[in-house]
Amino acid sequence: MKGHTEFQYATMMASQAIREKILKMMLTSHADRKFVVPLRFWGLKGERTTTLRYCEGCLAEWIENQQVPYWRIDHQLAGVYCCVKHACILKSVSKVRSRCYFDQTILRLINDSDERVIKKIVSSGKKAIEDIAKRSAHQQTGGGIGKSTNVYRDMFKEAGFVRAGSQIKHLAVISAWSNYFGQEYCHLTNMTAGRISKLLDRLSEISERFECSHPFMFIAGESFLAHHLESSGAYLPRIGCRALAFAAGREVVAPVLAAFSCNGALHRSADVLEFVQSQGDRWKLVCTCGVSYGMRKAARIDATQFVPVSYEARYRKQFRALIANGVNASCAARELRLAINTANRWAYRERVGDIEALSEREVRKLRSTWRQLVKNAPPERRITGATEANPAVFKELLKNDWDWFCAFNRSQRSPSRTKGLVRLKEPTADQILEAWRGLKSADPPIMVSRSAILERSGFPRIFNRKRPFEAILAELVERRPAYLERVISWLANLASGQRQVDYDEAIQNAGLRRSSFSKEQRERIREIELMSSVEGCSDRECELRADHFI
């Protein structure tokens, strides 16, 4: 039940007690077949792709191996538009399911006219979609209970999306979210600005967990935060892909490993080599002595392609000991078989050579000065601005307090300067549409002008009219004659509500005066006032008013 159904995925955000209760009810036969908690894992509210999805690579493999094709559960999960095994975009069936067949098999429904779920995709967007597929499949096969809201809040804070008052920066998150997933994927999954903002509002609440909420937005949030935490220099393990390509690559490299041995200076007989696959098409060998060897995947693999890329604690500790004993960086590099650049970098961090260490009091004073410089720097370029303001403090801390300096700068790094994160300089299409809907439904009416839309979107100071979003604004901006007609319709609705209305005050609340209307429009407003007064008067008064009009 847990490994071959959607149970683990659907109950990701449920507590352990609710999970056990649902599992017990699923295993028990009930006449009414009703659950205490409604589960919505097949359909995500607002998702544009509602038909069954399949992978051409999986289908070709099944046919080649003479296996009966079937619908993969992980391909039907919300927002999963990529095959984890083949890393290709899924296709959605265009053929309408027939009620004549109980078993809607793949071969019965697929057609040459089936199209890929996502038609246009860039490399950065594909990585995000692949990560969503991996995380969803991992959750469906063996995932446990999802993270609590406190963990999500800490991740947002570490990624630089939280203000000093512990408030999440909605605008920055929405912009970075859209840039990470891409407009088409956000459109297909209905990840609008309002929906993202609603998720952030829920994460800002005190509650620890939301009972059986749909897991898609939380999985997307984990992928988004993992990407930005990795970009800002933090370490987060990636969700592994148990694909056949990895197993096949491992078989190719296995003969080479038998002939390869670690040549680290501190390698011991008990140390062993472990084979791992890193990002993209790169392979890596990690020795327990602390040396990691990188290798690029190629058609022909041999031992000469292994190159040391990093050294761990054992080598760093021995390097420190050699430096403390008076050995210079070059000699220490030869003894430990390190690259000279690595040795120089370590020596620089250890404050060796001609650098004279400052006293603890002086370091504390430099720290305080740097904190104040960063605080006074522009928010969009904190570290750069502080460096330009006082380069001397920057250099002294870099030489004398490397660890604290790097950790502090990473925590204060501006989101706009983070790799992969683009500062929001203009509203997105979703933000513009959301602002337009809000202005259209406002009571009293507000004219849907360019400045009103931008101000409601949070961008009141954009004066350049050559931006890409201006084409959308041109279609949505309301002309003055149309706005005057909308105000007259609003006044008529007020009159039909049989309320006592001060029409002069109502017109003023709409930002207009009677003189703003044409002569014909003013006549219509007077008729609306008379109709309102007739509806609100007694029968005798109505007869007198009718005689007056006659």
Image: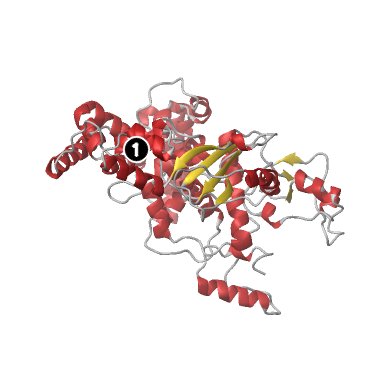
Nearer-the-camera pick, 37 or 453: 37
In the picture, measured across the screen, residue 35 lies left or right of residue 387, that is right
Residue at 22% across, 38% down: 400
Which residue is rendered at x = 69% and y = 64% of the image?
4
Image location of residue 12, percent across then percent down: 55, 62
Q: How many marks?
A: 1
Q: Nearer the viewer, residue 250 or 439?
A: 250
Q: Quadrant of residue 448?
A: top left
Q: How is the image coloured?
A: secondary structure
In which quadrant is the N terminus drawn?
Answer: bottom right
Circle 1: residue type: Trp
Nearer-the-camera pick, 33 or 326: 326
Q: Is residue 129 above or below residue 468?
A: below
Residue count near mark 1 (Cα–Cα under 10 Å), binned few <14, some 14–19, many ≥20 = some
Q: Is residue 51 left or right of residue 451?
A: right
| Residue at left offset 16%, top offset 43% | 364
User: Is 414 rendered above or below residue 5?
Assistant: above
Residue located 40% across and 21% down the image: 464
Which structural element holds mark 1? Answer: helix
The residue under label 1 is 346
Asked if residue 416 can be seen in this view, the reply is: no
Residue 78's x, y, as percent? 62, 52
Q: From where the camera sits, is residue 178 visible?
A: yes
Q: Nearer the viewer, residue 298 or 137?
A: 298
x and y, in percent, of residue 271 in the image = 51, 53
Residue 106: x and y in percent read: 81, 52
